[in-house]
Amino acid sequence: MNNSKKVPTTVSLENYGIKHNTIHYQLSPSRLHEITLEKNMGKEASSGALAVNTGEFTGRSPMDRFIVRDKITENQVWWGDINIPFEPSKFDALYDKVIGYVSDKELYVRDCYACADANYRMNIRVINEYPWSNMFAYNMFIRPTNEELKNFEPEWTVINAPGFMADAEIDGTRQHNFAILNFTRKIALIGGTGYTGEIKKGIFSALNFILPVQKNTLPMHCSANVGKKGDTAIFFGLSGTGKTTLSTDANRKLIGDDEHGWNNENAVFNFEGGCYAKVINLSAEQEPEIYGAIKKGAILENVIMNDAGMVDFENTSITQNTRVSYPIYHIENIKQPSLGENPKNIFFLTADAFGVLPPISKLTPSQAAYHFISGYTAKVAGTEAGVKEPIPSFSACFGAPFMPLHPTKYAEMLSKKMQDAGVNVWLVNTGWTGGPYGVGTRMKLKYTRAMINAVLNGDLGLYNYNDYHIHSVFGVAQPRSCPGVPTEVLSPRTTWNDDDAYYKTAFKLSNAFRENFEQFEEYASEEIRRGGPQRYAF
Ligand code: ATP
Ligand code: MN
């Protein structure tokens, strides 16, 4: 026993060039909560959760996200507006500046890891300027046991200095904030922004490169859960389409709410150890599990509270993107470890603000590939200036900002895996019904859940041609009935009460699909191209 190692209580950061500072290593979330209050950097909500303001940035800043162009990335990354190159020498210089900045500060250091599947595990060291950002890392990454900490060797390091402001002209950034990935040095360098999502999405982006390139494994921007019979379902979708909301289901065990891998051993595994839910308009009635997860240990971001610490979830005066992070064990019904078998059903979630896509429809393999590459959702214009037109938004693989490789790389892998596993793919419109944004209303969460449950329980078979209707514009199979959902809701055209306006809008969206797809035309097979909607000239 005399050579048994002790659980470390601190670490040296000298090999990062960090000297002369106070290091708070692996503090408990309750200690970080306390320190945040002591330093006046946050408040305690009546629920016991910690509430912080992330500062200037309340969301990610995709235009300030760079990848160092080096031997590893040069010929692999799909360079452009999404993956913006950064020169290695500029990185080294900026790194030294950030290190200089943090060296006279107290630092919060956490060792943790990503990927619930041991074969893909990535050890991470997170070095934070702020205590609450370190608590976020506790919530969101996977927590090593004490035993694992004894021999912990970090592979990637996140250096997170929200208070450091870059000088764009000298440092090679666009402005004062930045999130830069360096695959040679295995560092995610984040400065000038306190938005915590940059921390988790930095590691996600790194995995989205490493897994397919080095491990032939598919990373996915999706949530996942598993039913009583061990049937896994995964939900792809862009921000706000319902990944977190719909995967958090009292009747199914949650695997994870945002980032997963699909390995070659027939399993889906979570990258993370926690959830990061939107809390705009959150209610205990509609989303009891998420509401209940907001307790001591959770971190609320950019919410407004009254003097008694009651959160006003309807208040968007700081941002629409109010959030809460919590460790996954704040949800009762979870799968441990966060792994599931090959999915039986895949849902593509889209918040169609044109209100023309059916609330649920089944896709053929060609349509599935087409929709995956397209990654459609819609953005709604700000409400201040009255009702405006919704804007179609396409983001390849339902997560282009985090995908360093060309979208077809991920699409090919997904298509193959879907085929091998014999998965059913469904397109779910969690957006508007009865007309476009401004006229219609958001699809009732109750109905979306009923449709998804019907699929998962096998009640939406679509075996006979009279079980479904092929949509004349989008070509998808629209069920004629579904338990728990009024029949008319299943047909978007019927909910409009104006065929003319409906088809005009549907063709507007189908043309937007086709226009967006032009950039992928040369890579896509005839079969995939056939999965697209009809074109209509007007
Ligand atoms: P992100 O990638 O940013 O985490 P997400 O896909 O996880 O986004 P959610 O956090 O689930 O998105 O957000 C969906 C939001 O839409 C929630 O606020 C939810 O309450 C609301 N909502 C309203 N109607 C529906 C519906 N029919 N289906 C799903 N969500 C709905
Ligand atoms: Mn989410």
Image (cartoon, rainbow, N blue to C red):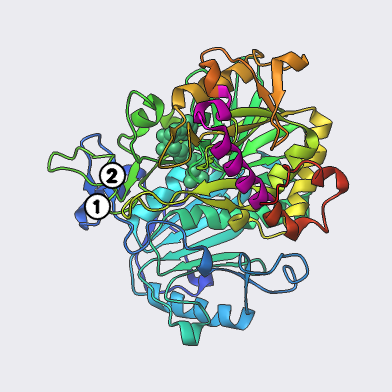
Residue 261 on the magenta segment: no
Residue of label 2: 50
Q: Residues within 10 Å of mark 2 (few under 14, many from 20)?
A: many
Q: CA distance from mark 2 to mark 1?
A: 7 Å
**Residue 126, position as x, y percentages in the image:** 48, 57
Q: Is residue 340 left or right of residue 161?
A: right
Three-letter code, disc 1: Gly
Residue drawn 47% across the image and 30% down it: 443
Residue 511 lies in the magenta stretch: yes
Residue ID for mark 1: 42
Q: Position of residue 494 (x, y in %)?
A: 55, 25
Q: Furthest-bottom residue in view?
A: 170
Q: Which comes before the other along the chain, label 2 or label 1?
A: 1
Residues shaded magenta: 490-513
The reply to whether residue 5 is visible in this rendering is no
Q: Outermost residue toward the left?
A: 307
Above or below for 213 versus 308:
below
* Image spot of residue 280 (x, y percent): 35, 41
228 left or right of 196 in image: right
Disc sitting over residue 86 in the figure:
none
Q: Amino acid at mark 2?
A: Leu
Can you tell which quarter of the image residue 281 is in? top left
Q: Tell me: 59 left or right of 509.
A: left
Q: Which corner quadrant of the image does residue 128 belong to?
A: bottom left
Kindly identify the residue that appears in the image at 64 percent across and 52 percent down: 512
Q: Is residue 339 above or below residue 351?
A: above
In the foreground, 391 or 127: 391
Task: Label 1: state its secondary structure.
Answer: loop
